[in-house]
Image: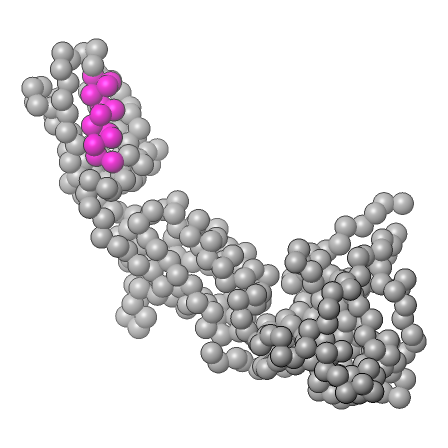
């Protein structure tokens, strides 16, 4: 996978003042570098600028398994009452009109199910109603989808870029899909849901082709504060070194690490970066992952400082899509 290097300037951290609520502080074991290869993997969260390939497949469906859809054309015939025979189109409301009985639901049924429903409707009018339903023209929505998707250079696939607003636009879907902050698995479910309402016979698979949002942020008393791309497993000491190291005012024993818990709420932990050096044990180093923040203060921090609002203000605005905003208490 080709990763595009993103050069970004550090954004000012803003936050609204509100009564502060204590946020749970993680005391889980610190991961060593050997625990995980965290570059771009299954838990990667999509970001504006990412490129996704969507591949469309249309498996062959037997007529007796086909579920009728809007725009399909049918031939309805009666064994003993040919004067009731006719050709009908399924209207946008999903219904057809039959003689003397009016409208009947058709979309979503198989031909056999529709024939059974018609027989039931005519049971009071005919002694032994026996109708058959056959398809004349069907799959209009599938044909429209194929026409919209098919391109000379990519065939039945599309390359989609996540827009700056975090959404993607796909052929024939009326509304854009919010993609930023989702995993690829979550996005796949949203794409499938969108297209199932158009055609249950279309299968769409999505692949991340280019990741631009595999970023962390290092700020505070460091030489080069800003955003840094994770192109390989990187621990907290390496991230600080990449950001130019500590300044003369940086508190190495009081570095704030912000990450997200399993519900994507921000959690904070105070790191003592001198321990790995003093003890020669990499187990004291935190392995960074997408969206993490390191803040080096000029004054010592305590656990009491790590309120929800404080952590939220430290997280840069364009990394907040990876987090859920903590609830704020009212005064």
As drawn, is 328 to the left or to the right of 287? right
- Outermost residue to the right: 299
Can residue 314 be seen here? The reply is no
Image quadrant where residue 321 sits: bottom right
Q: Nearer the viewer, residue 22 or 90?
A: 22
Q: Determine whether 81 is above or below 135 in the image.
A: above
Q: Nearer the viewer, residue 306 or 218?
A: 306
User: Is the magenta region chiefly helix, strand or loop?
Assistant: helix
Give coordinates of residue 106: x percent, y percent: 28, 32
Residue 331 drawn in magenta = no
Image quadrant where residue 38 sits: bottom right
Residue plotted at (80% across, 50% down): 328
Residue plotted at (9% across, 19% down): 81
Give coordinates of residue 317: x percent, y percent: 71, 66
Can residue 187 be seen here? The reply is yes
Residue plotted at (84% across, 59% down): 307
Residue plotted at (72% across, 75% down): 286
Give coordinates of residue 312: x percent, y percent: 78, 62
Count of number-bearing discs? 0
Image quadrant where residue 264 sits: bottom right
The part of the chain drawn in magenta is 110-122
As drawn, is 263 to the left or to the right of 168? right
As drawn, is 74 to the left or to the right of 238? left
Q: Determine whether 10 is above or below 52 in the image.
A: below
As drawn, is 185 to the left or to the right of 243? left
Give coordinates of residue 281: x percent, y percent: 75, 83
Q: Identify the colour scheme used.
A: one colour
Quadrant of image for the C terminus: top right
Q: Determine whether 138 is above or below 27 in the image.
A: above
């Amino acid at each position: 996978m080709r990763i595009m290097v993103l050069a970004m300037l550090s954004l000012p951290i803003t936050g609204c003042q509100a009564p502060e609520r204590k946020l749970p502080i993680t005391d889980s074991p610190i991961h060593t570098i050997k625990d995980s290869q965290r570059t771009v993997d299954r838990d990667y969260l999509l970001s504006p600028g990412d490129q996704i390939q969507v591949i469309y497949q249309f498996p062959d469906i037997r007529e007796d398994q086909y579920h009728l859809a809007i725009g399909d054309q049918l031939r309805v015939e009666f064994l003993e009452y040919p004067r009731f025979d006719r050709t009908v189109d399924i209207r946008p409301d999903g219904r057809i009109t039959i003689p003397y009985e009016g409208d009947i639901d058709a979309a979503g049924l198989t031909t056999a199910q529709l024939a059974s429903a018609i027989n039931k409707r005519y049971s009071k009018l005919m002694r032994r109603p026996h109708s058959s339903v056959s398809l004349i023209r069907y799959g209009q929505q599938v044909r429209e989808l194929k026409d919209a998707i098919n391109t000379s250079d990519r065939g039945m696939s599309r390359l989609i870029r996540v827009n700056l607003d975090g959404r993607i636009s796909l052929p024939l879907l009326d509304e854009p899909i919010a993609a930023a902050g989702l995993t690829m698995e979550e996005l796949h479910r949203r794409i499938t849901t969108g297209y199932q309402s158009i055609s249950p016979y279309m299968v769409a698979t999505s692949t991340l082709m280019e990741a631009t949002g595999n970023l962390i942020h290092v700020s505070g008393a460091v030489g080069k504060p800003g955003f840094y791309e994770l192109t390989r497993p990187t621990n907290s000491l390496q991230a600080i070194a990449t950001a130019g190291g500590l300044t003369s005012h940086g508190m190495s024993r009081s570095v704030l690490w912000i990450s997200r818990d399993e519900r994507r709420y921000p959690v904070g932990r105070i790191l003592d970066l001198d321990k790995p050096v003093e003890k020669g044990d990499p187990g004291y180093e935190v392995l960074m992952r997408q969206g993490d923040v390191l803040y080096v203060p000029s004054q010592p921090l305590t656990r009491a400082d790590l309120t929800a609002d404080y952590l939220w203000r430290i997280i840069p605005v364009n990394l907040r899509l990876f987090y859920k905003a903590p609830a704020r208490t009212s005064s």
